[in-house]
Amino acid sequence: MNTIKRFYSLSLVAFLAFCLSSCFDFKEEVTINKDGSGSFIQTVDLGNNPMIQMALNMQSDSAKNANKGMNKMDSTLEETKARLSKVQGISNIKTASSSEGMKFSVMYDFDDVNALNEALNAMQDKDENGEVKMMQKQYSFKKGQFSRANVFAMGGSGMDMSELMGGKKGDDDVEKTEEEKAQMKQMMQMFFGNANYTYVLHVPNKVKSYSNKTNTDVSEDKKTLTMKVPFMDLLDEENKANIGNNVKFK
């Protein structure tokens, strides 16, 4: 029984690595204007990790095409554009991909922060009724202040990372053993050990203050704030990194 459970747990991690396009070097870049409008860029860099390239190749619908991984990524980008085009207040949607290092980006303009949050939620999994399973308000704005909530969505995974890391019971309502938890962490380290989450915020005037001092740097001109966190720190349920940040600017 334990062997079956361990196989199931490891299969979940493998499935996660196969299916999630937002699990490795992941960057969100926001430019906010004085009126609350702005632009957003999300970049995923899969690097030259052979395991990821193998996973993308295995997912490809075209078994005969030598560039299968990029075909999968291009298909994902097209689906992303289609979803974003339905969000009111989102415009100028563009995507970019590079076969060198397997890197791709999605960028768009937003009329206000509500449109930005709607766009981010549009990329989450939906239930049988077409409703987003996990609605989140990631960003908020008021005059001279832009905030990022301490939340993180794993793209359209539909998977609870705390469960994978052993923090919660699984669907069978059976607590993972310490050995199974250790195995899961080892697997997660293998997939995500070198990954980072980076948040960049460009503000119209100089930064006056920011709430997250631990992971944050501010540029010399005081108009760009950068927060970089190891991905594994986001998956650690016991000592999870705080990626919330309340930024005030002149």
Image (spheres, rainbow, N blue to C red):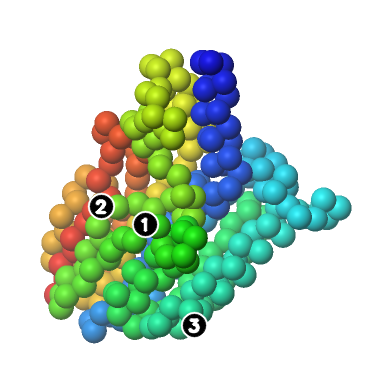
Would you place residue 14 above or below residue 88 in this image?
A: above
Q: Which mark identifies residue 150?
A: 2
Would you place residue 160 above or below residue 127 in this image?
A: above
Would you place residue 32 above or below residue 136 in this image?
A: below
Report crowding for label 1: few under 14, some 14 to 19, many 20 or more residues within 10 A (C-alpha): few
Residue where numbered disc 3 is placed = 92
Q: As rendered, which of 179 and 234 lies closer to the eye?
A: 179
Disc 1 residue type (three-letter): Met
Q: Which mark identifies residue 38?
A: none
Disc 2 residue type (three-letter): Asn
| Residue at image point 53% right, 15% down | 1
Q: Which mark identifies residue 134?
A: 1
User: Which element is circle 2 on?
Assistant: loop
Report crowding for label 3: few under 14, some 14 to 19, many 20 or more residues within 10 A (C-alpha): few
The image shows residue 25 at horizontal and vertical percentages of 48, 49
The image shows residue 2 at horizontal and vertical percentages of 51, 15
User: Which element is circle 3 on?
Assistant: strand
- N-terminal of the pair, mark 2 or mark 1, is 1
The image shows residue 132 at horizontal and vertical percentages of 41, 62
Q: CA distance from mark 2 to mark 3?
A: 28 Å
Report crowding for label 2: few under 14, some 14 to 19, many 20 or more residues within 10 A (C-alpha): few
Discs 2, 3 touching: Cβ within 8 Å: no
- N-terminal of the pair, mark 3 or mark 1, is 3
